[in-house]
Image (tube, rainbow, N blue to C red):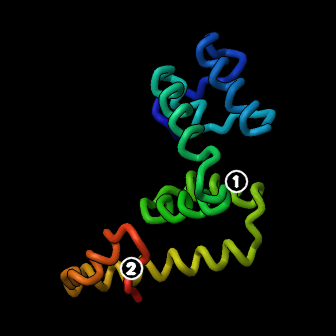
């Protein structure tokens, strides 16, 4: 159960309804997800979070499906079932195929495994890798 109560549309203040309307219009939905309803208990947090989400997940140089796959990966790493499920649904809606999701999940699993091995073995970062990651042009890697 969430802390507090969900703010349903019909019970929302005009400020909260305005954010809900923008969410539904932007996402082409006819309903509000429970995440938004719960954080609407604090209208400032609702507004700030929605504005940030709209900006970060909106058009940019990264493909919309890729953004959703990144969001899924971080959500899985953080153990957030709600977010990993929500963004899997959004990724599908934006065109992610079952094969794309399977491949992304394999990458997520591989990253989790290798991250754990690096941490357990206390492997120090190679300077060559650091320089390649910081290079402004195409690095001489791999």
**Chain-order first, disc 1 or disc 2:** 1
Q: What percent of the width, then of the height, locates residue 80?
A: 49, 56
Q: CA distance from mark 1 to mark 2?
A: 34 Å
Viewer-side residue, 55 vs 93: 55
Locate the C terminus by quadrant.
Answer: bottom left
Which quadrant of the view contains residue 12? top right
Local packing at callout 1 (Cα closer than 10 Å; few below 14, some 14-19, many 20+) is some
User: In this figure, which residue is indicated by the disc labeled 2?
Assistant: 139
Q: Is residue 131 left or right of residue 96?
A: left
In the image, residue 30 sits, relative to residue 76, either above or below, namely above
In the image, residue 31 sits, relative to residue 130, either above or below, namely above
Task: Give the residue at x 59% y 13%.
Answer: 15
Task: Give the residue at x 75% y 60%.
Answer: 92
User: In this figure, which residue is indicated by the disc labeled 1?
Assistant: 90
- Kind of element beneath mark 1: helix
In the image, residue 96 sits, relative to residue 124, either above or below, namely above
Q: Is residue 22 left or right of residue 43?
A: right
Which quadrant of the view contains residue 67? bottom right
Q: Is residue 79 left or right of residue 90?
A: left
């Amino acid at each position: 159960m969430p802390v507090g109560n969900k703010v349903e549309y019909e019970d929302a203040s005009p400020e909260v309804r305005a954010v809900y309307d923008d969410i539904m219009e932007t996402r082409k939905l006819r309903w509000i997800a429970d995440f938004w309803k719960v954080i609407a208990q604090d209208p400032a947090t609702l507004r700030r979070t929605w504005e940030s989400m709209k900006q970060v997940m909106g058009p940019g140089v990264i493909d919309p499906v890729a953004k959703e796959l990144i969001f899924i990966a971080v959500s899985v790493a953080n153990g957030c079932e709600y977010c990993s499920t929500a963004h899997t649904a959004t990724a599908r809606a934006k065109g992610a195929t079952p094969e794309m999701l399977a491949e992304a999940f394999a990458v997520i699993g591989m990253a989790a495994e290798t991250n754990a091995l690096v941490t357990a073995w206390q492997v120090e970062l190679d300077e060559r890798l650091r320089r390649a990651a910081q290079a402004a042009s195409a690095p001489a890697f791999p």
